[in-house]
Image (spheres, rainbow, N blue to C red):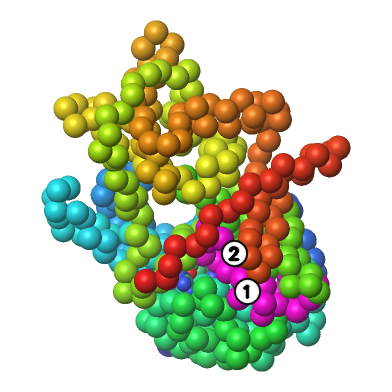
Amino acid sequence: MTVESIEAVLDEEARRRLQTLAYEISEQGALRSPPWRRVFTTVRRHVFLPRYLQDEQPGSIPPRWRLVEGANPDDHDEWLTSVYSDTTLIVDLKGQPIPPERGGGSHPIVTSSSTMPSLMMRMLEDLDIQDGHRVLEIGTGTGYNAALLCERLGDTHVTSIDIDPELVAAATRRLAAHGYRPHLVAADGIAGLSDHAPYDRIIATCSVERIPYAWIAQTRPCGRIMVNLRGPLMRSALALLTVHPDGTASGPLLSEGAIFMPLRHDPSAPYDYTVRITRPATDPTNGVTTLDPASLHHHAAWGFFAQTCLADAAFRLVTADDDETRLGTEIATPDHSWAIIWHDRRDGCYPTSQAGPRRLVELLERAHRHWSALNEPRWDSFAVAVTPTGQWVSYRHPDNTSLRWELPLPAPVP
Ligand SMILES: C[S@@+](CC[C@H](N)C(=O)[O-])C[C@H]1O[C@@H](n2cnc3c(N)ncnc32)[C@H](O)[C@@H]1O
């Protein structure tokens, strides 16, 4: 077969699989409108994903990655099936240094992926993108979403930024090969892109702890921003903000769960997940709590509420110095308050140690009582508000009693 006829067979196979996938994600309610259905069934995802990395043993540390390549005859069927499945596919890893005390070396961390199609389409549909809109995407990655936007709006209406110049170069090539020429830039998307502002819509496909105010300043009044808001426990939710004429923005957190990789500032390195905690020199006081610390990590709605109430806290899992099997959750805040809640239950309670000006275990217990009294709300019971000087997550209660928590100021950009 000639190269052209191989491509034609692949294109026909892709068309058939795209129709099936479009049907599946329409049934889920992710793909809803005729314009996006046309776009979704037109843009070939395999073009933007010539290869991806498969985690051979999910959950194993470190993960074992295997490259799956469309051009490799042994991988071809697996590749095509994955590309046209409703799955997130990992496309880039970078090494994060392991501290010498933990053995040194480096550990590969995911730095780019192609988002699962149903989530991508849900975000695009929820953004209510209309003909003539100008859209900024933060996180070009493979270029697949930029292609969807170009197919929907035309190249001149689409700008996309990625921190990684190599990803931007590859996406530029693949987009151009299929006739799409959006404005692509390799830069830190935290500053948006003022050259092409104002935008009607901004979509961020990486997560942030605070919404960069530049994104609001670069969006037209009544424009919308879709972003994944993440807290210190790595619990995240999609926020759909509307920008107001006075330069503020507000909007709900959406019900669909979503976890995007964090926005990072170093193009050659992954986001640094290392949690730095200094234990205070003062002797801690020991006590107990009935609050199960594992629930912070395993119960998404409670974890989200806890990180909202303790927005300036750092959380990490630790093991005891004298017993590697004994797990604890360590919490610290910038005012040198510190606590550990051990995971081993004794007589219905969990041992604690804490020091510093704030009693973090009691604050966490109070947050848990509050969450129970509110009937254990999920993140979609909350909304976000942003002004030039502050950002808040607030509780949307049917009787309009609103409670709100301020998000911490951003760490300085290195
Ligand atoms: C989930 S991937 C994006 C998927 C992409 N939209 C697609 O269709 O393939 C997240 C991307 O965000 C990028 N990113 C991380 N930090 C960034 C930053 N500060 N500015 C711009 N892009 C960033 C990563 O390099 C990565 O490619």
What separation in Å lies between label 1 and label 2 (alpha carbons)?
A: 8 Å
Q: Which mark is residue 76?
A: none
Q: Amino acid at mark 1?
A: Trp
Tell me if residue 150 can be seen.
no
**How far across and how far down the image is residue 386, in percent?**
68, 62
User: Horizontal placement of 113 versus 20: left or right?
Assistant: left
To which quarter of the image does residue 138 belong? bottom right
Label 1 crowd (10 A; few <14 / some 14-19 / many >=20): many
Q: Amino acid at mark 2?
A: Ile
| Residue beneath the point at 71% across and 30% down | 374
Quadrant housing the C terminus: bottom left
Q: Which residue bears the numbered disc 2?
A: 211
The magenta region covers 200-224
To which quarter of the image does residue 61 belong? top left
**How far across and how far down the image is residue 267, in percent?**
36, 75
Tell me if residue 136 can be seen.
yes
**How far across and how far down the image is residue 164, in percent?**
40, 77
**How far across and how far down the image is residue 266, in percent?**
36, 73
Q: Secondary structure at mark 1?
A: helix
Is residue 165 placed above or below 65 in the rendered structure? below
Q: Which residue bears the numbered disc 1?
A: 215
Quadrant housing the N terminus: bottom left
